Image: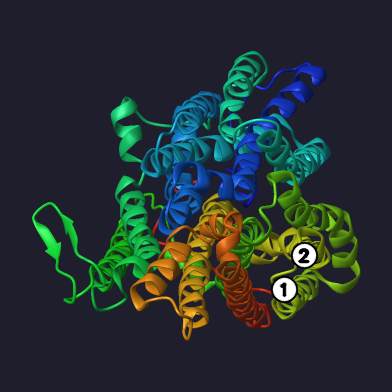
Amino acid sequence: MSLTSSVSPPPARTAAPSDARRRRLGLVVISLGVSLIVVDATIVGVLLPRIVAGLGMTTSEAEWVTSVYSLVFAALLIPFGRAGDLFGRRRLFVLGTAVFTLASVVAAAAGDGSALIGARALQGVGAAMVLPAALSTVNAMFTGRERAAAFGTYGAMIAGMAGLGPLIGGAIASAADWRWAFGVNLPLGLALIAGALALMPETRPERSGTGGAGRALREIDWTGGVLAALGFGALVCGLIEGQTYGWWTATRPFHTGPVGWPEGGLSPVPVVLGLGAVLLAALAVVERARAAAGRPVMLDLALFRIPSFRHGNLAAALVNVGELGLVFVLPLFLLGVHGTAPLQISVAILPMAAGAFLTGAVAHRLARTRGPVRVVRIGMVLEVAAVLALALTVSATTTGFGLAPWMFVYGVGLGLTSAQLTGVALADVPRELSGQASGTQSTARQIGAALGIALIGTVFATGLGRTMAGRLEGTELPPEQRAAIAHELRESAGTYARELHADADRAALARAADESLAAATRNAALATGAILALGLAVSLRLRPGPAPRPESGRRRGQSES
């Protein structure tokens, strides 16, 4: 998850506390608030196999549980950033924490996959309120060298908590039920709300003119937010559900209201993907028209005329595709083959976070001697090499300890890339558009995360079913039973392998399932490597230096942050 969001220029009026100690405590509260939404994302990756088994979820539902959070987060990040500027950042932080806490309680009590998916979407709403409010408040509370030190402390705390997330999730799930990983957010959220009300200042830029709340609400680009959510949501939906309903020809009946697709006819998937493309095209038209009219926009297309911004955002999105795709697939592989406990799954995931955390300071020093663009490329080379090595070495006997070295190398590359990519992408953006630009990059990262889970998850599930069906060919099982076993393994995201292992009479089927899981993981890793290699190719087009000023139709000071 990206830690960069919409940071407004220092406001004209700030109610920051005068007491330095109180401001430092306020910074701790803010950092812990953002840590909560970061940790919750990493915890789910470790807990996912337990959640899938506990709720009897399908592979598609598992992908939705992880991707819907990033998708909603991405769609609402910039509009809520603007809402914080208009109505107060502390107010938005407290409201977002309350929404996130409530959603966590709903997630802990979820009785099926649909309820959990809905709760995760609501968590995304809360996270989209918290992050821009937190960053803007830190920006307003501190100035000069204090601001640089504050953001350094803020980033270090969040990075450390993100690294501990898998370990915390594994420990909670090993000692108790997976629901406690969500339920523990209730006391934490209430404590953060109390701390925010006591220690955070209320800040907002001065607004000229009149018009009240109604006019302020009209200053937010709700149309752009809705079109972005629906457009990218349709793309993610098509990628996830293609394996269920067929990519062109419907493999099963589908009905929703008066609309239905019979089996054997046109699948709803290409229709949904086409709808997503139309909605995103409409988003581009609407945003261009709003910008030309001098109205605030969610997505300033003029920014993409800056080469470093355009290529940097694309590279950032591709990096997140790889990161979230791996975190989705590897725990499912480990559980299916070894029945690994969540704490043991952390052994595979934690090195990635540790590698990224440890290279933070190194990246800054290396950037001073080699240049930030070169550091980005070095990081992406390490990412590609680590993922390809993982793909070449993973087998049915690979454990979390066997994955750990490659995940550490991947984390080192991720740390080098992420530490510098934001600065590279924003280097040539005019200062008055920096809030809009940083928010856009965070949105691109979250969209990459959602698409990564959908795409890599689809490669994993499709390969799993196909490989298992191939391994059952030539056995004495009837065709209908072979097809049913392959279908069950794919639909259960591989957790059906544990049932096969539990029955001594089906040991041969269990071995076939293990080999199929390993093959599907190799396919997913190779797809991830290809996507990251594309990101590396994009990074080769990053060139430091002056860039043309974007010709935005908006007036100075009207950028939506």
Q: Position of residue 397 (x, y in %)?
A: 74, 69
- Element type at mark 1: loop
Which residue position holds label 1?
394
- Residue in front for this viewpoint, 59 or 335: 335
The answer for how far apart the CA atoms under marks 2 and 1 are is 8 Å
225 relative position to 156: left or right: left
Residue furthest to the left: 258
Q: Are marks 2 and 1 in contact (CB under 8 Å)?
A: yes
> Residue visible at 63% across and 52% down?
2
Q: Tag 2: residue type?
A: Leu
Q: Position of residue 99 (x, y in %)?
A: 46, 28
Which residue position holds label 2?
403
Tell me, yes or no, if residue 70 can be seen here.
yes
- Residue in front for this viewpoint, 163 or 77: 163
Say few, some or many: other residues with alpha carbon within 10 Å of mark 1 (under 14 / 14 to 19 / 20 or more).
Answer: some
Tell me, yes or no, if residue 551 can be seen here.
no
- Residue in front for this viewpoint, 478 or 523: 478
With respect to residue 406, does 114 lie above or below?
A: above
With respect to residue 392, does 165 lie above or below?
A: above
Q: Tag 1: residue type?
A: Val
- Residue in front for this viewpoint, 62 or 133: 62
Which comes sooner in the sequence, label 2 or label 1?
1
Say few, some or many: other residues with alpha carbon within 10 Å of mark 2 (under 14 / 14 to 19 / 20 or more).
Answer: many
| Residue 442 sits in quarter | bottom right
167 relative position to 182: left or right: right
Q: Position of residue 166 (x, y in %)?
A: 71, 45
78 relative position to 294: left or right: right
With respect to residue 379, does 75 lie above or below?
A: above
With respect to residue 70, does 383 lie above or below?
A: below
